[in-house]
Image: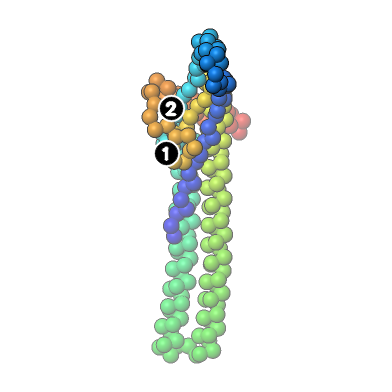
C-alpha cells in the first residue's frame, strides 16, 4: 500500500498594506500645474517589507519534522499490517483451491470455506478503508497544527517587528511568491529560530505539568 502523501502546508500572507492616495486627473493646463505642485509637496510613503521561505522553514522546523516522522512511522506500520492481512487471505484462498483440485475436500465443504474467505476479504476491505481514513484525518490534523503554529508565531513576530507586509515564498502554492528579493529583507532564519525556541519551551512546559 502506498503511503498517504503529506499535505502541502500553506501559511497565509500577513498584509497590513500602507495606504496610497491618488490625485485627480485633470486635463486643463491649470489643473496640471496645480497637480504638479501638490505632488511636489506630498511626502512619499514607504512600505516596510520582509519575506520568508516557507520550504526552508518547513525543512528546519522541529515541530514539523517530529510530527512528520511520527506520522510516517504510523503510516508504515499500517501499511505493513494491511499487507500481512491481505497476503494471509490470498494464501488461504490459494490453499483452498489447491486442496479442492487434489480432491481433499467435497464441493460443499469447499464452497463453505470459499464463502468464509470471501467474507474475510470483504471485512478486510472495510478495515483497510477505515485505516486509510484515519490516516487521512491524522494527516490533516497534523498539517493544521503546524500551520496554526507558524501563523501564530508570524503574527506575534510581526507585532514586535512592525512590518507593513510579510510575504511567504513557496513557488506557486502561495498567491504572492517571492521570485527574487534583497537578502536583507529575508527573515527566514529569524522565524526558524523563533519557532524552534517556542516549540522547545512548549515541550518543556508540558513535561513539567506531567
Snapshot colouring:
rainbow
Task: Give residue 115's position: percent from left, percent from top.
Answer: 55, 80
Task: Give residue 84's position: percent from left, percent from top.
Answer: 45, 64
Q: Quadrant of residue 26?
A: top right
Q: How crowded is mark 1: few (under 14 residues within 10 Å), some or many (20 or more)?
A: some
| Circle 1 residue | 171
Q: In terms of sequence position, does the residue under pointer 2 or pointer 1 come before the other? A: 1
Number of numbered labels in the structure image: 2
Q: From what the image shows, is residue 65 above or below residue 195?
A: below
The answer to whether residue 158 shows anywhere in this view is: no
- Nearer-the-camera pick, 143 or 18: 18
The answer to whether residue 25 shows anywhere in this view is: yes
Task: Give residue 52's position: percent from left, percent from top.
Answer: 45, 29
Query: Going by the image, does 38 lie left or right of 1?
Result: right
At 56% across and 16% down in the image, what residue appears? Answer: 31
At 45% across and 27% down in the image, what residue appears? Answer: 51
- Nearer-the-camera pick, 67 or 158: 158
> The C terminus is located in which quarter?
top right
At 40% across and 88% down in the image, what residue appears? Answer: 102
Distance from disc 2 to disc 1, alpha carbons, whole Å, reads: 15 Å
Q: Are the residues at dot 2 and dot 1 in contact (C-beta closer than 8 Å)?
A: no
Q: Nearer the viewer, mark 2 or mark 1?
A: 1
Determine the secondary structure under disc 2. helix
Determine the secondary structure under disc 1. loop
Query: Going by the image, does 147 lie left or right of 87?
Result: right
Q: From what the image shows, is residue 135 above or below residue 178?
A: below
- Nearer-the-camera pick, 135 or 185: 185
At 53% across and 10% down in the image, what residue appears? Answer: 37
> The N terminus is located in which quarter?
bottom left
| Circle 2 residue | 188
Task: Give residue 148's position: percent from left, percent from top.
Answer: 57, 35
Amino acid at each position: 500500500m502506498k503511503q498517504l502523501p503529506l499535505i502541502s502546508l500553506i501559511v497565509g500572507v500577513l498584509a497590513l498594506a500602507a495606504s496610497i492616495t491618488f490625485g485627480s486627473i485633470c486635463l486643463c493646463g491649470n489643473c496640471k500645474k496645480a497637480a504638479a505642485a501638490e505632488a511636489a509637496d506630498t511626502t512619499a510613503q514607504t512600505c516596510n517589507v520582509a519575506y520568508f521561505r516557507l520550504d526552508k522553514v518547513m525543512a528546519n522546523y522541529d515541530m514539523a519534522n517530529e510530527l512528520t516522522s511520527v506520522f510516517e512511522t504510523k503510516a508504515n506500520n499500517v501499511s505493513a499490517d494491511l499487507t500481512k492481512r491481505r497476503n494471509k487471505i490470498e494464501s488461504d484462498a490459494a490453499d483452498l483451491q489447491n486442496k479442492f483440485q487434489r480432491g481433499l475436500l467435497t464441493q460443499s465443504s469447499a464452497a463453505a470455506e470459499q464463502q468464509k474467505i470471501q467474507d474475510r476479504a470483504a471485512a478486510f476491505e472495510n478495515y483497510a478503508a477505515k485505516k486509510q481514513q484515519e490516516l487521512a484525518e491524522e494527516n490533516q490534523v497534523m498539517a493544521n497544527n503546524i500551520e496554526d503554529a507558524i501563523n501564530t508565531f508570524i503574527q506575534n513576530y510581526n507585532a514586535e517587528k512592525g512590518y507593513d507586509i510579510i510575504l511567504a515564498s513557496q513557488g506557486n502554492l502561495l498567491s504572492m511568491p517571492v521570485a527574487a528579493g534583497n537578502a536583507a529583507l529575508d527573515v527566514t532564519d529569524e522565524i526558524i529560530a523563533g519557532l524552534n525556541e517556542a516549540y522547545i519551551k512548549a515541550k518543556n512546559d508540558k513535561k513539567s505539568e506531567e
